Image (cartoon, helix red, strand yellow):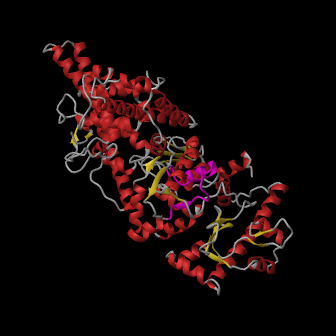
Amino acid sequence: MRFSPGLLDEIRARLPLSEIVARRVSWDRRKSQPARGDFWACCPFHQEKSPSFHVDDRRNRYKCFGCGASGDHFRFLTETEGLSFPEAVERLAEQAGVSLPAPDPQAAARAAERASLADVCEMAARFFQDALAMSGGEEARAYVARRRLKPETLREFRIGFAPNGRDALKRHLLGKGVDEGAMVEAGLIIRPDDGRPTYDRFRNRLMIPIQDERGRVIAFGGRTLDPDGQPKYLNSPETPLFHKGTMVFNFHRAREPAHKSGQAIVVEGYMDAIAIWQAGMGNVVAALGTAFTEDQVGRLWRLAPEPVICFDGDAAGVSAAHRAVDRILPGLRSGYSFGFVFLPDGKDPDDLIAEGGVAAFARELAGAMPLIEVVWSREVDAARIDTPERRAALEKGLDDLVRTIADERVRRGYQLDIRLRLSNLFYRQARDRRMAGGGGRPGQGAERGGTQTPSGPARGGDLPDSSLFGNERTLCGLCLRYPDLLERHVERVSQARFGDTLHARFRDELCRIATELQDVPVSGFFETLDNRFYQILSEALDGGEVPGTAGARPAPRFSDLLQRLPILRHEPPADFVEDLFCHYLDTLEIRTLEQELEEEMGALGDGLDEAEWERVRAQSQDLARRREECARDEQDLAERARGLRGGRVAATGTTGQGILSGGSGAGGRLPGGAMASSPR
């Protein structure tokens, strides 16, 4: 249904926006002015300490000056509750007492048909539920007992049983006055082409109703109870009510828990979803097929910005994940992606929960792989790069994939990330080839850097316990883990003054790749880079070596960065990471201001004229201002980090040390009050 601008304006006029938003926030009494329709609160879309979320009742608009979220009544409901736009209009119209216009006759006829079919599906659901409890349902009851489904779960999901007779459901519905044509259209019975009598589609199956976003039964999934029965799972066909490519099982139940937790779990089958829901994780849904559609991807993003998809760890599960990647990539946009979990081979979520409780499944979710990791492993694991042509083919294949991403900002971030990974991969392959061939010069990069292949953690020229060594190394790691931030702030990064020679050379080459080399194939420049660049790159991307272990056992990727910044393990939102990134830049810029002021004072000597004094005073005031701002930012980041960490502990039961820095005693005060990571 299309809604006229006048109708939407009438709804807005009758319902103050502050009344809608107040269900999700608490107003700041000091900043808000209710008499003027001016309200402030902490943003419901991101973690913050100081209120930056503004609602203006006069203009019927909200805007967060922290994360940029903005909109009106309807946008607020679609963003906070996952409603579609028509659903948001219908809900607010009811609250405002505004009558919605009658649909056009054709639309009314289609709606009536759908309502009629929904009534038929509802009658079928009741029949299946009753059949489960009656004589003949013993095998089905035994199956749900083996699956450890509780009576309240059976009632909530309205699980039932389709008897083994040819037309048990058909006869029941005929007795209720339903004609065969409606049963066929609802997908409940099959009409043979050869003129034989119609018969039930579902026979001797455990029946799981599929419900729409309003909770109406619109289709069914049936699990065979015959050990030799095929197919194992059978869904309703496409009907006027049910479109498999747009539906997500359990969406209507998962919507609120997903919005409250900020996370959505996606599994392959509805029985897995039911088991996880029963274990207490209400934010779970299931796909209704082996491949995601664009509509399903968009619907999942209405639940959470980064849903986690669970796949079996066998070859079939990996293959399904790879198919999902191709569906997801084109629609990626800023702040929206997916995580991937590959369960232990032979285990499904129900097995994990039965053996180790919900905590065992939560641990698997906590180790979800980012989408880019799945893309990288899919392409690289199957590639050979022993010749220039094969390296070029791998690079082209990855580039073609990334170019399918429509969002320019996300696409550029992926491109830079892939180029850094390829640089490291090609460098390692060339290094290993040289070593196998009896040594030799590593090439132009080694001549420029004067450093041979790194062994062990990368160190610079300064002592690693110098006051800002840890900050510089942390900023280097952040640039690699979040290349989109490097690209957005490349000018500030390139101008920052690094005290450590290794860090400075790494930064220089990193900024070259992001700017002057962005259009040059990686295979054409990777050997021209300073060899010292690969010391930090390899340590971050390959994990380096675990200290104190023989045989060079690799540590996890970015292990050094995660040790310095444990808060990153809690998957903070993008705006928090960017604020943290800029905070580390601020600390380096403050140190530069201090050094410039010291140099200025040293050059002037004892006698200062008035102009010199004014210049020094201005520099001192600027430095003091930057220090105060940095101290406030640090306090705000620490508070936000505590909130993030507390939310993660509540969700997963896990604990960890530190807020921004690593562990007890790891933090140190930096110039300007910034919190340092442990100086290793």
Determine whether, in the image, residue 74 is placed left or right of residue 666. right
Q: Quadrant of residue 70?
A: top right
| Residue 305 belongs to the span the image colors magenta | yes
Can you see residue 429?
Answer: yes
| Vertical position of residue 184 compared to residue 578: above or below | below
Please report the residue visible at 64 percent of the width from the left and 86 percent of the height from the top. 134
* Front position in the image: 577 or 615: 577
* Front position in the image: 93 or 420: 420
Residue at the far right in the pictured view: 195
* Front position in the image: 49 or 329: 329
Determine whether, in the image, residue 290 is placed left or right of residue 624. right
- Magenta region, residue range: 282-308
Query: Residue 642: where, in percent of width, then height?
Result: 33, 52
Query: Residue 218: where, in percent of width, then height?
Result: 69, 65
| Vertical position of residue 586 compared to residue 643: above or below | above
Please report the residue visible at 59 percent of the width from the left and 81 percent of the height from the top. 139
Query: Residue 457: where, in percent of width, then height?
Result: 24, 37
| Vertical position of residue 578 compared to residue 618: above or below | below
Determine whether, in the image, residue 404 is placed left or right of residue 395. right
Which quarter of the rendering shows the C terminus? top left
Q: Quadrant of residue 5?
A: top right
Residue at the far left in the pictured view: 606
